[in-house]
Image: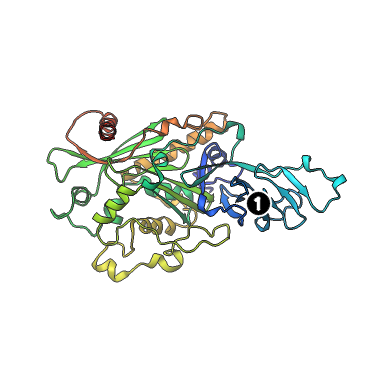
Amino acid sequence: MADQYELITRTGPGTPMGELMRQYWIPAALSSELVADGPPVRIMLLGEKMIAFRDSAGRVGVMDHRCPHRCASLFYGRNEEGGIRCVYHGWKFDVDGNCLDQLNIPPHQHFKDKVHAKTYLARERNDVVWIYMGDKSRAPDLPPFEACLAPKERVQLRFVKRDCNWLQAVEGDLDTSHVGVLHFGAARPSSKLDSDHRDLTENRAPEYKVLETPHGLTYGAYRPSATQPGAVYWRVAHFLFPFWIMPPVASLEHNVMVRAFIPMDDEHCMFVGFESLSYMRRNDRNRMQGVHIRDHLLPNETGWLGRYRMVENLDNDHMIDREEQRSVSFTGIDGIHTQDQAVTESMGGMVDHSLENLAPSDIAIARNRRMLMNTAKSFQSGIRPPSADNPRVYADVRGGFYTTEKDGDWLSLHKDEVDKLRAAALAAE
């Protein structure tokens, strides 16, 4: 029997979820990867193979890798004098796909005006190349995530390939109950731990509030505070259409961040993180052994899956250290991101969902799947997906953890906490 979730796990051209994702801007590469008149770079997103290049004037072009003449790959092309020239017959195209030259045809037989390479809109912001793969006339503004608009010297960019379906990766970050086990399972409740770690280790089984929102889905995982009697410890996270996530990896004050898990094909995705350097540095200072937030990457290669590859991977069992697992850490795997990578990749390229037994701790995952399926079906019926035409809804969203003694609606409490932090930040400027 076909997987009931194929509707939302498959994202190639013509698939419901793939076409839905094409209504949003996608971060595709670091600006530094593209050099004026330098070699083109292979990019694969949503099952499509593209090349990206920077022309002589510094403009970025992204196009189907196949030359529209005889379909030889433009990856082998010459990036020169304002365009990419196919090495097969010398046809040349600018960043907008216009044919500039047909080298193997006598000038009086040229038909350049009738040939056009398939191109995609490209924009650059804060050292990242974004592309839009849908109808160019419907392209919205770039998403105004708080972390994407922060001065680039305050934000760490992270691009990492993950060898699994995009939904497996998203659900890893949407699942907060694993944090107290996978990442802090070796920690024991102790007054020596900071308040967050004690809240995670003294009660590893939170309860949940979940709600669909204009940007996607929000949940609050809550449990009694281990450090403030009578208070409640909250971890609030957001899923934002179509593949963005804001997990509570830091306190609400420091959690200026957003992550994406973007399908490359159905069995590989690209983690893209925009993360505040202040919380990255703070976490690295405060984390215990093995639970830092850093990535070890291999040098980029030129293949379709050759960029942003982790040193720790399935081929070396993510460099698990069994002795360390027995004596120091819960996993024996070094690094929070590597731990997440290991468990989601271990499920296989596309997990067989019929083997799952979802639990109450998976309520956010179950609700998110249902929301995605309903949205994909609605899009098939002609209803535009949430926030596709109004990315402004992303601007005021922030996840994170905090402790409160107040009573009341959990979403109102969360908004109050965010507003208080932003007011303090404005007052300090």
Amino acid type for the residue under numbered disc 1: His
Q: Depth check: 420 or 179 in front? A: 420
Which residue appears at 28% of the width and 68% of the height? 324
Which residue appears at 39% of the width and 57% of the height? 343
Q: Position of residue 144 (x, y in %)?
A: 44, 35
Q: Is residue 426 above or below residue 277?
A: above
119 relative to 301 in the view: left or right: right
Q: Which residue position holds label 1?
A: 65
Which residue appears at 41% of the width and 48% of the height? 273
Element assignment for label 1: loop
Q: Is residue 269 above or below residue 217?
A: below
365 relative to 231 in the view: left or right: right
The C terminus: image quadrant: top left
Q: Position of residue 278 (x, y in %)?
A: 30, 48
Q: Depth check: 7 or 224 in front? A: 224
Name of the residue lying farthest toward the bottom: 323
